[in-house]
Image (cartoon, rainbow, N blue to C red):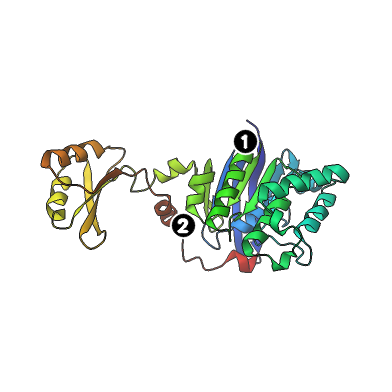
Amino acid sequence: MSAMIEVSGLQKQFGPFTAVAGLDFSVSKGEVLGFLGPNGAGKSTTMRMIAGSLAPSAGRVTLCGFDMAEQARQAQRLLGYLPEGAPAYGDMTPRGFLGYVASIRGLDGTEAKRAVTRTVALTDLGSVLDQTIDTLSKGFKRRVGLAQAILHDPPVLIMDEPTDGLDPNQKFAVRKLITEMAAEKAIIISTHILEEVDALCTRALIIDRGCIVADGTPPALAARSRYHNAVTVRVAADLAPAVRREIEALPGVTSVEARPVGADEIALTAFTSGEALIIEPVAALATAKGWPLKGLYAEPGRLDEVFRRLTHSDAETDEKVVA
């Protein structure tokens, strides 16, 4: 399948500071790419360059075959972009603003009205259509930003923190909308919410200090965690020492860690090397010993642990300052 978004050798310098250090990746139709990284990693800077709102120092971006540097108008016609903060004209109403965006996108008359009506329904803005944007809550402002991005039904979507400021119900609705749109589009989502990656993304790309440090499906990245195939049992605190010794003696178990769960319960996590599966031996041992377990489960891995291991949480420069 041909890529709808292609990024090649993308770089951005701000004086002596390198914000983006030569990124190469592509996104095809039907893919939702989660773009992850700590503050200062270069996420927003990269997305601005892909969207054509910031010129790169080097490298190339193409959207559906159109070069963003040489064919910006053609490329941006195919793009829906939700930038950080979702800026809009605060003295306009959502109705007026979306009508204005429709005209900029070349829609008029019945076509524009149909597009605005469809988008308002998708983003649930009907209750605030005639309220000035400045008076809206952060969540509604974010939905206005999302609405302008999808108004013209573009094949490419670039969204910076699309659920920022939304309550749990609103987050669920926006995630559902993105999932429903995904089959016919190529989508990049910048987010720091790792549960969003699991909920939305078919692939995740982690950058740190302007460089790609990981690229794969969420399950594949989670499998790089030390918790991959680990097994946790929960037992009463007085039983924990004996249970721990027995589990540590099992073949394939490399170590066991304990953590308290409440006042009188301990969670014991048994770690394994490589792809060894220890859930069945642990369960069989528990049955044989007659342990009154309060819980037993295997872990697929933890994306947050992989993220922390691959990135620098103490990044000295925040991209919001330099970009």
Residue 41 location, x and y as percent? 55, 59
Q: Quadrant of the C terminus?
A: bottom right
Q: Residue at x 53, y 40 (%)?
A: 202
Mark 1–mark 2 Cα distance, whole angstroms, equals 31 Å
Residue type beneath disc 1: Ala
Dots 1 and 2: beta carbons under 8 Å?
no
Is residue 248 found left or right of 78 in the rendered image?
left
Q: Give the residue drawn at x 75%, y 41%.
A: 66
Q: Position of residue 184 (x, y in %)?
A: 66, 36
* Picture quadrant of residue 162: bottom right
Q: Quadrant of residue 170?
A: bottom right
Q: Is residue 94 or residue 57 the one in the foreground?
A: 94
Residue 99 percent location from the top left of the image: 82, 53
Mark 1 or mark 2: whose residue is earlier in sequence = 1
**What is the quadrant of residue 257 in the picture?**
bottom left
Q: Quadrant of the N terminus?
A: top right
- Mark seen at residue 37: none
Within 10 Å of disc 2 (Cα), the crowding (few <14, some 14-19, many 20+) is some
User: Helix, strand or loop at disc 1?
Assistant: loop
In-image side of 253 versus 298 (left or right): left
Name the residue rendered at 78%, 45% in the picture: 115
Number of numbered markers = 2
Tag 2: residue type?
Answer: Thr
Residue beneath disc 1: 183
Q: Position of residue 200 (x, y in %)?
A: 54, 45
Q: Which mark is residue 311?
A: 2
Tell me if residue 235 comes above or below residue 85 in the rendering. above
Residue 200 in the figure: left or right of residue 255: right
Decide if residue 8 is in sight here.
Answer: yes
Of residues 164 and 206, the one nearer the viewer is 164
